[in-house]
Every structure is written in C-alpha cells, then in structure tokens.
C-alpha cells in the first residue's frame, strides 16, 4: 500500500518520478475516494492528462514496462494498493495484458 500526501517525502514531493515497473502487468487499485484528496493519479508518458480513479476500488491497469509517473497529491491523503504481476511466459503475458485492456474498455472484471 502506498500513501501519498503533501510533504511526506524528504524532498517535499508527493508523487513518483517517471519510471517503469519490473512487472508484466501493474494494477493500481484506489483505496481512497477522489473527494479525499486533490491532485494525484497516474500520468503516462506521451499521453495527455492524468488517470485518477474516482472511487475506492477502481483500478488502473497497464503494462509494467510502460513509462509512467505518479502525479503529486496536492492536498488530503491518497492510498493506493499497487500490485505487480509477473509472468515468464511471453504468450501468457500478452493474454494478461489483453484481458486488462478489455477490463478498461468494458469496465468489467477480466476473466
């Protein structure tokens, strides 16, 4: 579980720099509702805007090797459960990513 709030880090920042995860698939599950904080969310390199789940339980899934950053939380406190899924079989990895993308498009659970 990751906690984001203004001033928590030694450098005063409350986000994450641009990075890649060492995972096949990364899931960011919101544990806070959007009204509990301001700012925050996931910013993907090369895309406009920030993805911020509106309610606790909502999830953002992405390929772990996609370059992304955590936008700064400017007020309140934001909690996120971050799950890293690993798979050594390339075919299974592609299938897992396809299921996650289907989840995103249809807003339903991936099988």
Image: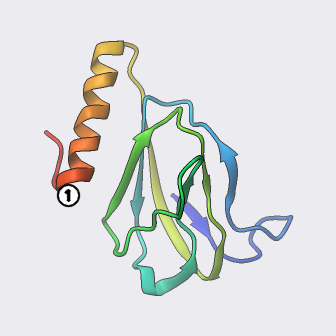
Residue 73 vs 71, above or below: the answer is below
Q: Residue at x 68, y 47 (%)?
A: 18
Q: Is residue 68 left or right of residue 62?
A: right
Could you tell me which secondary element the residue under label 1 belongs to?
loop
Q: Quadrant of the C terminus?
A: top left
Q: Quadrant of residue 71?
A: bottom right
- View extreme (right): residue: 11
The image's colour scheme reads rainbow
> At which x and y percent is residue 36?
48, 85
Q: Which residue is mark 1?
A: 107
> At which x and y percent is residue 98?
26, 33
> At which x and y percent is residue 66?
53, 37
Q: Residue at x 60, y 47 (%)?
A: 45
> At which x and y percent is residue 92?
28, 19
Q: Is residue 31 left or right of residue 107?
A: right
Q: Residue at x 59, y 66 (%)?
A: 3
* Mark 1, other Cα within 10 Å: few <14 / some 14–19 / many ≥20: few
Residue 44 vs 23, above or below: the answer is below
């Amino acid at each position: 579980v990751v906690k984001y709030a203004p001033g928590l880090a030694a450098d005063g920042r409350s986000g994450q720099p641009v990075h890649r995860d060492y995972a096949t698939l990364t899931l960011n599950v919101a544990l806070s509702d959007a009204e509990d904080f301001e700012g925050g969310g996931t910013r993907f390199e090369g895309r406009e805007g920030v993805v911020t789940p509106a309610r606790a339980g909502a999830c953002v899934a992405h390929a772990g090797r996609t370059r992304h950053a955590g936008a700064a939380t400017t007020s309140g406190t934001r909690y996120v459960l971050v799950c890293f899924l690993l798979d050594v079989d390339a075919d299974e990895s592609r299938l897992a990513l396809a299921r996650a993308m289907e989840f995103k498009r249809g807003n339903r659970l991936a099988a």
